[in-house]
Image (tube, grey):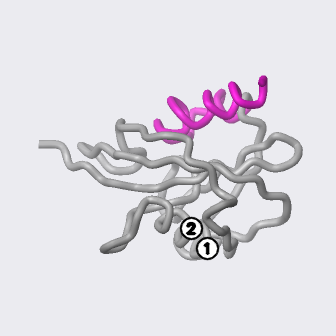
Amino acid sequence: MKKILTISAARLINSRGEILLVRKRGTSKFMQPGGKPEIGESALQTVIREIHEELGLLFTPEKLTFDGEWVGPAANEEDTSIHASLFSARFDGQLTPLAELEEVLWIAPEDALLRKDIAPLLRDFVLPQAISSAQK
């Protein structure tokens, strides 16, 4: 039986329309900042805490927009699916990877979609949504 992880993740976009991708230490796939909830946390509380831990950014709830949910394969864990709650926000500035992050990358969503080293959630949901909303 497949294991299912519940996560919250953020689509951060800068003023140039680039999306932030992160790569966790010891992994090969880029994804969005975010992670698993602690006991009693809502999806929104989880994403706010994770963004703060991983990037040092502190977002208030009204700065984040709920973008939907996605279920699909996990990027770095075999025989595992994720149930993700997605949020988006705007951010401009330099970032330093903290906690378990090894690398951060600002990239145009169209260019990110061409990469082979991106998580399924990013490829199948986040990037198409980012491209679609940029065209509106």
Amino acid at the residue labelled 2: Ile
Range shown magenta: 111-136
In the picture, the disc for residue 48 is: 2
From the viewer's side, name the closer residue of 84 and 54. Answer: 84
Secondary-structure class at tag 2: helix
Count neighbours of disc 1 (C-alpha within 10 A) and say few if under 14, some if 14 to 19, many if 20 or more. Answer: some
Q: Position of residue 98 (x, y in %)?
A: 62, 74
Judge whether 41 appears above or below 3 on screen: below
In the displayed image of the protein, which residue is found farthest to the left? Answer: 1
Q: Position of residue 12 (x, y in %)?
A: 69, 51
Determine which of the numbered discs, if any, sits on residue 52 in the image: 1
In the image: residue 117, left or right of residue 108 = left
Q: List x then y, in percent, for residue 3.
A: 21, 49
Q: Residue at x 56, y 41 (%)?
A: 67
- Tell me: 29 left or right of 130: left
Q: Going 52% across and 60% down the picture, which residue do you hit?
A: 34
